[in-house]
Amino acid sequence: MKRTLIAVAALIGFASAANAVSVTVTANQASYVVGDTITLTVTTDATAATDTAIFGQVLYNAAIMGGGSATQVGLTSITGIIPWVTGVLNCGGGSCDAFNQIGGLNPLPVDQGAGFAIATLSFTAAAPGVTPVSWNTDPGPFQFDFFGLTNGTGTTVTVVPEPTTAALLGLGLFGLAVAGRRR
C-alpha cells in the first residue's frame, strides 16, 4: 500500500511538472496593413525544467507574411553560469525556426521563469488575409520539442487592405452606382 501511494504521488508530481512548461506566440498588433513589420514574440516558462536540447519551428502562410528573420535568447543553467549553445535559425517560405538550442550531453536545468522572451520573429505584411501561426508538430527533424512539451500556443496574423485602397474601392463602387442610376 505504501509503495502504491508513493507511485501515485510521483505520477502526480510528474504530471504537474509537465504542465508547468509553456510556450506562447504573441503578435505586437491586432492587425497590419501591407508593408507593415509583423513582430511576433515567443515567451516561455521553463522553471526547473531539464533537457538536452529544444527546438521550435512556426508555420504560417508565406503569401500573407513575407520574408522573415528570427533572433533567439540563449537559455542558461545553474544560476546563469552555463549557457546553452544556440543553433542556426532558418526563416522563410512558410516556416521559421524560433529557437534551436543544445544544453549538453546530460540534461541541464534552466533558470528562466515565466514570461521569458526566448525569441523574436519579424516579417513583412505582404498581402491582405489571415494566417494562423502555429507550431510544427509533424514527426521529424523540425518537430516542436520544448522540455517535453510537443505543442504550444500560437496566434493569428491579420493583414488588412490599406485605408486608401478601401477608400478608392468604395469611391469606385459609388461611381458605378451613380452611373447605373443615370441610365
Image (spheres, rainbow, N blue to C red):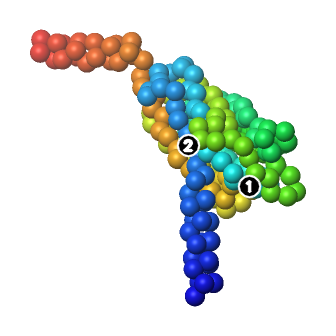
In the rendered view, tell whether residue 116 sits above or below residue 134: above
- The amino acid on which the numbered mark 1 sits, given as a three-letter code, is Thr
Is residue 137 shown left or right of residue 106?
left
Q: Residue at x 52, y 47 (%)?
A: 153
Residue 29 shows in the view: yes
Is residue 32 shown left or right of residue 136?
left
Q: Residue at x 28, y 17 (%)?
A: 170
Q: In the rendered image, which residue does mark 2 sit on?
A: 24
Nearer-N-terminus badge (1/2): 2
Helix or strand or loop: what does disc 2 sit on? strand
Task: In this rendered view, identify the residue nearer to me: 6 or 178.
Answer: 6
Q: Residue furthest front?
A: 2
- The amino acid on which the numbered mark 2 sits, given as a three-letter code, is Thr
Q: Residue at x 50, y 21 (%)?
A: 34
Q: Position of residue 3 (x, y in %)?
A: 63, 84
Q: In the rendered image, which residue does mark 1 sit on?
A: 50
Q: Quadrant of residue 74?
A: top right
